[in-house]
Image (cartoon, helix red, strand yellow):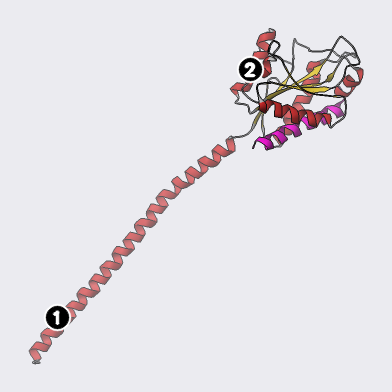
Amino acid sequence: MSSRRRRVYRRKKRRYRRIFIINLFLIFILISLIKIVNICSGLIKSPDARMVSSDINLLEDTDVFTVCIDPGHGDWDVGAIGVNGSYEKDIVLDIALIVGELLENSGLNVVYTRNTDTLSWSDNSIENLYERVRISKDNNADLFISIHCNSTYDSSEYKGVETWYNPESEDSKALALVIQEELSNLEYTNDRGIKFYSDDAPLAVLNNNDAPSALIELGFLSNWSDENILTSKIWQKNIAEAICNAILSYKDLIE
């Protein structure tokens, strides 16, 4: 090969090598740019992902099990009057407030139809009952618990705890069973079992409620033994704990 041809060949070889190096460099830059774009895209999307996650957590946090507690009577309506002069409205309010505090301490949301001795509606017995149901519905309650004391003029010998439910609701029956079991286990009075009302004599707070509901008659104020227990602060706390335990057990049952 002549010296001229060798020089031409070397120049071509050097040119091809430069082109090859330039191409490699361009490919490297292109790959780097693609990686940078992907990283940036990921950073842009991450806040959205975190926001969605936060929204889900927020929904989960706000989706708290709600119990509507209804202390019967109140204000102008004293309810049953005990043989020693106690008022049903006062006894059931004391117990209801303890139940509510225990439930809130367990992480549940609690609403009351009343938490004082003052009613915000008129002294009309029908409106009184439907207003209590409205409060439960407006707060999308998962459970409705109405707390009462019993009484009879027939005989002072009648005593015992009983729990009423809507016969059209199997969920309410299950709730009543759990409540009655917890209360009867305290053995503070007779166990009168669970009861349902007849079609011709419905209990308005149960019959018109959307949530599983129960009405508890804690004992007879017309019986001196029941009245003494239901006015005892120690027994009120024990009874409230039993009702709270029943509600938590029912919640676990349905979840």
Task: Say which quadrant the C terminus sits in.
Answer: top right
Determine whether, in the image, residue 43 is placed left or right of residue 125.
Answer: left
Residue 102, percent from left and from top: 74, 33
Q: Check residue 12 in the rendering and tell me which mark sits there, or answer none.
A: 1
**Disc 2, SS:** loop
Residue 100, percent from left and from top: 72, 29
Residue 51, percent from left and from top: 48, 43
Name the magenta segment's main secondary structure: helix
Q: Residue at x 75, y 29 (%)?
A: 177
Looking at this view, is 2 or 140 the one in front?
Answer: 140
Q: Is any part of residue 107 visible from this angle?
A: no
The number of callouts visible is 2
Q: Residue at x 72, y 32 (%)?
A: 247
Determine whether, in the image, residue 109 is placed left or right of residue 59.
Answer: right
Q: Is residue 254 magenta?
A: yes
Q: Is residue 86 magenta?
A: no
**Disc 1, SS:** helix
Amino acid at the residue labelled 2: Asn
The mark lying in front, picked from 2 and 1, is 2
Q: Which residues are magenta?
A: 231-255
